[in-house]
């Protein structure tokens, strides 16, 4: 941009160059501008004579003066970016209307410089800046294309502009320019497309504009920035279930290309490739519990299988063992979703994931390095969200480290739970890897979200008849009982369910007898809380557990139950409930399910009382 002075004065005096050509106002404007450029540190361009002088040149019919004005705007705004008003933007927007490529190129560069400022981003769009920029994106001149797309990219980083850009007609030319042979244009265009993937509406607009096949094809770009922008954009697009279906149906090479990118030399690309696979493999209907295996697979099921079949496990294992927390998080989040599919459980275990997963439960207090693995605000794993307000550097790093570690722990223990769901052999391998020991030592000192996952995992492991005696021998009951009184309902329910599972089909109820009164109120306290909770799930858990106790035949335990008046009264209350004689008038499914659950609770409580007679 340093050619501004020579464009204005050409190395000669202003009189010799412009005297025959310029009007008096134009000569005066050139003189003011030259004085400013020679002594620019002495006055503010945006609030004094130089801006008015430059505006005079913009309105000139002399294209050389327009070029000089555009170049001057580009140079000045490159070095001095601040919030400006309409007086500054109006002449630049007028220059965008020029048919001269040099004027267009410099004017769009100036506008792109100013679009770094958030206030300017809004004002540029409000003043109608999108329309001329869209026209310039369709220019035959590559330099003009590059600067126009770069400006759109900056404008698209502001949340208030995203929908306006999507509705302006910019997405189709942006998609076309993403295929440009010029790498600068390609980078700017793919960056702009990425910035448009942070809302449901815009993602659908991108799909309609034909962005998906372009983004998938560019995953093979030799440029790491383009790979990163496209991978992240596809990851965000895959947040929506409808888009996951489209991707699975129309892009058969997508999974294999993402698997290949997990071996990139760029950590940011590796991270986004794993997160994209994670989103493709997500299935909200199956995240909370395993569903029975069927003979038909959904698109998500197929993707979960395809990631493994495409050789994704070795790369994910390498990322899982990385010293960079963001790479670990992206890997374990992906493995969590892959592990939902029953057919993937054994391959994951056989690939050597158990020990590294269990090691991740311990946590790491070291904050993530601010190096090549850092990702932009567009790198969100699931649903994209606006960046959080800035915090002091040390505090922000500590907060990020804590949040990242909590996520890693949640995904890790959830993965272990998934891997234990369908196989006795897998349950045994997970216990032998030290999972239970880690949970016992950590569960009291982790967040409620991690506690919820840990107790859910223990509940699954407690289903194994082969493991129950081991779990009881390590005093898992003493860990679970206090958690049945957690302020978090999920932790309470999972802990109660684990106790119920442990109580079924065992030969020795001595651990339950020993824990009848303590710790934290003991088994009796847990039963009272759940039986009197007025929560159908908790009531069902307690009534079912009571039935296991009384049918187990341990006379000491049965006697303790009989002698507890609160437990007996609560059981009688549940058994004496009356179900509504008529089904809900509106046929509400939730009401029908509640009625069915109440019926089961009544039946369980009645069986308990009958057995105790």
Image (tube, helix red, strand yellow):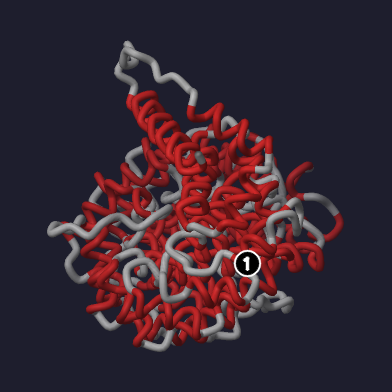
- Where is 362 relative to 565, above or below? below
SS class, disc 1: helix
Side (left or right) of 500 relative to 26: left
- Seen at 35% across and 58% down, the residue is 290
Residue 560 in picture, x, y percent from top left: 65, 50
The picture places residue 210, in percent across and down from the top left corner, at 23, 51
In this figure, which residue is indicated by the disc labeled 1?
511
Q: Quadrant of residue 599?
A: top left
Residue 490 in percent (x, y) is at 57, 48
Q: Quadrant of the N terminus?
A: bottom right
Residue at 69%, 49% in the rendered image = 486
Quadrant hosting residue 337: bottom left
Seen at 60% across and 41% down, the residue is: 530
Q: Is residue 162 left or right of residue 523?
A: left
Q: Seen in the image, is 129 located left or right of residue 227?
A: right
Identity of the residue furthest to the right in this view? 42
Between 189 and 590, the residue placed more toward the observer is 590
Which image quadrant is residue 586 in? top left
Res 170 seen here: yes
Residue 580 x/y as whole percent: 39, 16
Callout 1: 10 Å neighbours few (<14), some, many (20+)?
Answer: some
Q: Residue at x 49, y 57 (%)?
A: 553
């Amino acid at each position: 941009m340093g050619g501004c002075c020579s464009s204005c004065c050409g190395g000669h005096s202003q009189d010799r160059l412009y005297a025959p050509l310029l009007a008096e106002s134009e000569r005066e404007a050139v003189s003011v501008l030259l004085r400013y450029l020679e002594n620019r540190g002495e006055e503010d361009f945006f609030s004094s004579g130089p801006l008015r002088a430059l505006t005079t040149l913009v309105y000139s019919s002399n294209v050389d003066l327009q070029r000089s004005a555009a170049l001057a705007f580009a140079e000045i705004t490159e070095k001095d970016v601040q919030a400006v008003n309409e007086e500054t933007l109006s002449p630049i927007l007028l220059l965008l209307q020029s048919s001269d490529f040099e004027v267009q190129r410099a004017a769009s560069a100036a506008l792109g410089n100013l679009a770094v400022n958030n206030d300017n981003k809004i004002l540029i769009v409000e003043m109608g800046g999108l329309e001329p920029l869209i026209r310039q994106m369709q220019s035959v001149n590559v330099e003009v294309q590059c600067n126009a797309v770069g400006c759109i990219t900056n404008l698209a980083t502001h949340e208030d502009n995203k929908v306006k850009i999507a509705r302006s007609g910019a997405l189709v030319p942006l998609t076309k320019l993403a295929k440009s042979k010029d790498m600068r244009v390609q980078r700017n265009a793919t960056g702009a497309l990425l910035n448009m993937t942070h809302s449901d509406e815009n993602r659908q607009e991108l799909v309609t504009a034909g962005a998906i096949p372009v983004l998938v094809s560019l995953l093979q770009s030799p440029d790491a920035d383009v790979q990163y922008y496209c991978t992240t954009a596809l990851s965000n697009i895959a947040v929506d279930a409808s888009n996951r279906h489209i991707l699975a149906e129309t892009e058969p090479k997508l999974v294999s290309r993402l698997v290949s990118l997990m071996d990139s030399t760029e950590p940011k690309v590796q991270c986004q490739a794993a997160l994209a696979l994670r989103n493709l493999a997500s299935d909200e209907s199956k995240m909370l519990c395993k569903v029975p295996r069927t003979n038909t697979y959904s698109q998500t099921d197929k993707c979960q299988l395809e990631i493994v079949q495409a050789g994704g496990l070795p790369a994910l294992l390498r990322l899982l063992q990385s010293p960079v927390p963001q790479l670990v998080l992206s890997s374990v989040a992906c493995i969590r979703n892959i592990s939902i599919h029953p057919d993937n459980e054994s391959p994951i275990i056989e690939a050597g994931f158990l020990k590294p997963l269990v090691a991740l439960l311990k946590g790491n207090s070291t904050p993530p390095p601010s190096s090549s693995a850092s990702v932009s605000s567009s790198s969100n794993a699931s649903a994209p969200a606006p960046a959080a307000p800035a915090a002091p550097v040390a505090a922000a790093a500590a907060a990020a480290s804590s949040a990242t570690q909590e996520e890693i722990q949640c995904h890790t223990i959830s993965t272990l739970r998934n891997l234990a769901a369908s196989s006795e052999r897998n349950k045994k391998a997970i216990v032998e890897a030290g999972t239970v020991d880690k949970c016992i030592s950590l569960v009291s000192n982790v967040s409620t979200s991690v506690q919820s996952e840990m107790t859910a995992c223990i509940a699954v492991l407690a289903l194994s008849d082969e493991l129950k005696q081991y779990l009881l021998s390590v005093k898992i009951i003493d860990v679970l009982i206090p958690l049945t009184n957690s302020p978090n309902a999920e932790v309470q329910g999972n802990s109660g369910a684990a106790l119920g599972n442990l109580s079924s089909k065992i030969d020795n109820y001595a651990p339950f007898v020993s824990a009848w009164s303590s710790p934290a109120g003991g088994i009796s306290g847990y039963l009272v809380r759940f039986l009197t909770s007025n929560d159908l799930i908790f009531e069902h858990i307690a009534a079912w557990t009571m039935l296991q106790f009384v049918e187990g035949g341990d006379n000491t335990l049965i006697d303790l139950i009989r002698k507890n008046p609160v437990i007996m009264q609560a059981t009688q209350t549940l058994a004496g409930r009356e179900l509504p004689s008529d089904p809900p008038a509106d046929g509400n499914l939730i009401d029908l399910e509640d009625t069915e659950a109440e019926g089961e609770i009544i039946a369980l409580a009645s069986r308990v009382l009958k057995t105790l007679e």
